[in-house]
Amino acid sequence: MPNASVRLRPDATIGATDKRLFGAFVEHLGRCVYGGLFEPGHPSADARGFRRDVLALVKELAPSIIRYPGGNFVSGYNWEDGVGPVEDRPCRLDLAWRSTETNQFGTNEFIDWCRLTGIEPMLAVNLGTRGGDAARRFVEYCNHPGGTTLSDLRKDHGWPLPHEVKLWCLGNEMDGPWQMQARTAEDYGRVAAETAKMMKWVDPTIELAAAGSSGRNMPTFGTWESTVLDHCFDHVDYMSLHTYINNDADDMPAFLAAPDLMDGFIEEVVAISDAAAAKRRSGKRIMLSFDEWNVWYRTRRTPEDRARPGWPVAPPILEERYSMGDALAFGGMCISLLNHADRVKVACLAQLVNAIAPIMTETGGSAWRQTIFYPFAQFSHFGRGTVLRAEIECPAYDATYYDPRGTQELRFPVTAPYLKLAAVRDDILGGVTLFALNRHLTEPMHLKVDLEGMGLRGIRAARQLCDADLAAANTAAEPDRVRPGLLSGVVLTGSVLRATLAPASWTMIRLGTSG
Ligand code: AHR
């Protein structure tokens, strides 16, 4: 049985989590919007067509910020198509997902939906088929108080107050050949810099994220970020990162080790960004926006999908059914994000409903939680505070993670400790939450955590997600097949916590300052 020993100290910290670290992503893709969060005529829909059953689950999941409207979709999107009287809005071919976009849901509906849920909106501009002019006009439409044609148009459309959208993405995955009007790094860097200048001239309070390479597995990765920052450094606040991990090789140990590669990816982008600062002798630090992350492999699109006949409205695509094993790898990704809270200030789980999502719905029917819902909800509810630097001693294993995505097949060797863990201190109440992943597939783990000096007196909660069947999943018929249960036997003796983590399990333990 592997033993893991962890040491935490009050003054050994990584940094405070930004509220935006707990975000998600809504794209016009499949049934994410239509038949997901928006479905006029559904028995639970409100007067605006927002599904109340989905809203209830979104509130429980608690994302803090949502990126919209894409994704690949945004590279062909005319924002003007999605505003104004609904009956006048055009139907368009969406080349990203080979669908018909009806534009019944657009920016103003998205803002209303966000306000209803208390979530911050984050918008992306189209730097594929469009550019700086459309982007600056979009900012003016959304954020300018009034007195100009575009801001008064928003008022005429029924939104008298500015939307005050603070965070904007400069395009999406522009190095991907699957992107509408993909660009070279030089080309994108120049367009992004000129666009950023104008957007900030319209509203100097906004923050901007430059599109990073589509992934660490892209041949462009590294050079792309560096070249883009040569152009954009002075104009942007964030560099974006995207990662989807897979179990294509049907190799669970390697799959569960993959979040450690995400740690490496983050550290590489930090290094590239800081090198850009050093070249300029600048004290400015570019922060990271990990604005797409998740597990995704069963429902990837293939080139043949583009050749299929027909242009359906809201087709059921990318409807990944997440298993227990997926939830473990996903939990590992949550831990990676927490442990880089000093530089990753924004992160968006991709996506929110139906398309590679924690929430599933039947069009016209029920809504339920997928397995990955649970680690995310715990991460969002209890991951807010100051992340502590955990010193971990524990045996490790070697694995080779296979990544066939992007434009090349790669194999990454990785040595992964069986325990992956993050510890977050609640800055108001002083309590500490531990998030722990036992990656040993067959053996339980004895966990010992030394919390000396932390002033902790009692266990507030201990919950574990595990199942003997790593393929188990939740469905409409069996929505609660996989859900967290209570973890017994967690003991705090003086300043030492002891617990036994089941094989292949995700655990959350909360400690408080009173007994
Ligand atoms: O989230 C699904 C897709 O994955 C997004 O549209 C794109 O940005 C990424 O390739």
Image: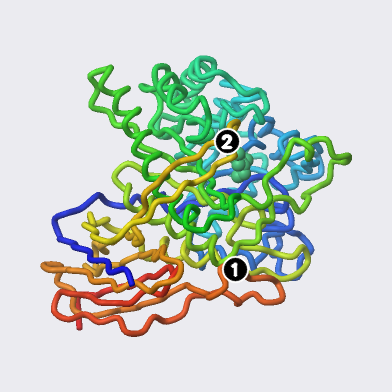
Badge 2: how crowded within 10 Å, few (<14), some, or many (20+)? few
The residue nearer to you, when weighing 256 against 359, is 256
User: What amino acid type is highlighted by mark number 2?
Assistant: Glu
Answer left or right for 249 relative to 285.
right
**Looking at the image, which residue is at 27% across and 79% down?**
459
Answer left or right for 180 relative to 258.
right
**Vertical side of 480 occupied by 374: above or below:** above
Badge 1: how crowded within 10 Å, few (<14), some, or many (20+)? many
Which residue has dot 2 on it?
Answer: 409
The residue nearer to you, when weighing 434 against 386, is 434
**Residue 336: x %, y % from top left:** 38, 51
Query: Could one spot residue 48 in this view of the protein?
Result: no
Query: Could one spot residue 134 in this view of the protein?
Result: yes
**Vertical side of 360 occupied by 289: above or below:** above
Which residue has dot 1 on it?
Answer: 369
Which-is-in-front pick, marks 1 and 2? Answer: 2
**Looking at the image, which residue is at 41% across and 75% down?**
502
Answer left or right for 351 relative to 362.
left
**Quadrant showing the C terminus:** bottom left
